[in-house]
Image (tube, grey):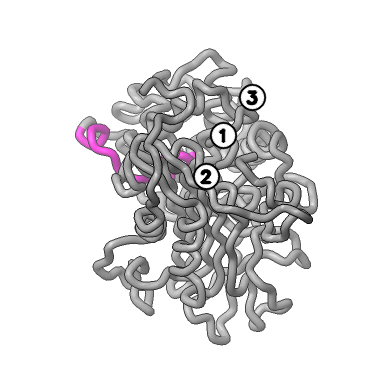
Amino acid sequence: MHRICCLIGTLVLTALVAGCTPSDIVACDTQGCISEAKLSANIANTLNNKVVGYVAIVGGIPSAFGGQARTTADPPAFAMLPDLQTNLASVSKTLTTVRVLQSLKANNLTIDSKIAPFLYSDWVQGPNIGKLTFRDMLTHRSGFRQDCGGSKTTYAALKTQIATGVTTANMAVGSYNNCNFAIFRELLPRMQGTNFSSLPDAARAQQSAALYITLMNQGVFQPLGIPSIGGGTAQCKPPPAGTTDILSYPNPPGTAHGTDWNDWTLACGGGGWVLTSADLFRVINDIATGNVLLTNDERTQMLANCLGWDCSVRSDCPNPYVCKNGDLDGAPIAVWTYAGIFKCNVPVVVVVNSYLPAPYQPYDASGNSIPSNGDIIGLVHAAYNAAAVSGTPKPCPGSAG
């Protein structure tokens, strides 16, 4: 784990080990240095008492959290904590990417291999589908333009997009689309040697989704001891009734009931994974500093090529770092999630269960889009800028320069 000597076990909670005094960590690369404690505090100060609830976990600093995971409108009322589950929204794309890279290696494939051999043989392949590579999907360069917003990423939606095909003009311009990653719910089983082509579509959708979830647990979550709370397997749906999980609310919540965003089992991949903030941190931390999930070469490839990160389609992570924004918007209810890696190996995870405070809230009180200078990426970017400290710039470990 990444410098967590002052945290109990691996749950990344604020409780301290007896005799261990937390101290600041200064992280440097060739761009300069930041204080991890300042970055954590900056995020917390921006969110504290301005959202319904939040969790922020930065590098080796004890996690910051505040507000409510559930209000009195949805008993039992519960404080926001790092070990409560929520739908991670589009940060799910980063998780899916890890499993794709593992499968590519196992099959002696590269990110520039074509996806067509792993599509169902009875799916109609429209124009240019045969040209699409794994890199195209993982960087939103497929040319997909079908409306795949939210959970509009079912088997039927994917089949329709493949039959429609893509234009060369659209392939030349990156454009964010959830189906770029939901398609791996159908591709990964085929890459692992399982073929559901003999089944009718409805049964095929069920079986491929179930196997995708199994493959993700086997390759990404279980090796890191996830789920860390309650055991079992990670799922793309809310936990069983009676389990205290995070709900999303209007901001302020008033007497409104929250939402858990429902069951995404048949739409998972580009969104929908339900984990705790602490569990998400385990994955991002291993990408940043470990070798449990990926080899050094695979990790370098994932970071340098912006595979599964938003730097493939936007430039405000900030450069030259990777980050991923997640947003589920059910106006006036929303959840925002964030994962990023700064300064060579500083993982950052943020979860907020309501709209963000101005100026990072890109919606008005009715959920209408308004001009804005940011979202959760902008919020963390500003916190990062304000965390700069003096220090000696130095290359990342293992880098050439």
Quarter of the image with the N terminus is: top right
Please indicate whether residue 127 sits to the left or right of residue 137 in the image.
Answer: left
Q: Which of marks 1 and 3 is in front?
A: 1
Q: Which circle marks residue 289 in the picture?
A: 1
Residue furthest top as drawn: 108
Q: What stretch is highlighted in magenta?
A: 169-182
Estimate the spatial distance between the alpha carbons at disc 2 and disc 1, rounded to whole Å.
9 Å
**Residue ID for mark 3:** 194
Q: How crowded is mark 3: few (under 14 residues within 10 Å), some or many (20 or more)?
A: few
Task: Give the amino acid type for the residue marked by disc 2 in the picture.
Answer: Pro
- Where is 58 relative to 189, above or below? below
Task: Give the amino acid type for the residue marked by disc 3 in the picture.
Answer: Thr
Residue 127, horizontal then vertical, whole percent? 29, 28
Q: How many marks on residues? A: 3
Q: Which of marks 2 and 3 is in front?
A: 2
**Residue ID for mark 2:** 347
Q: Earlier in the sequence, mark 2 or mark 3?
A: 3
* Residue at the spot 40% in from the left edge and 36% down from the top edge: 29
Please tell me whether mark 2 sits on a helix, a strand or a loop.
strand
Q: Which of 49 and 113 is in front in this view?
A: 49
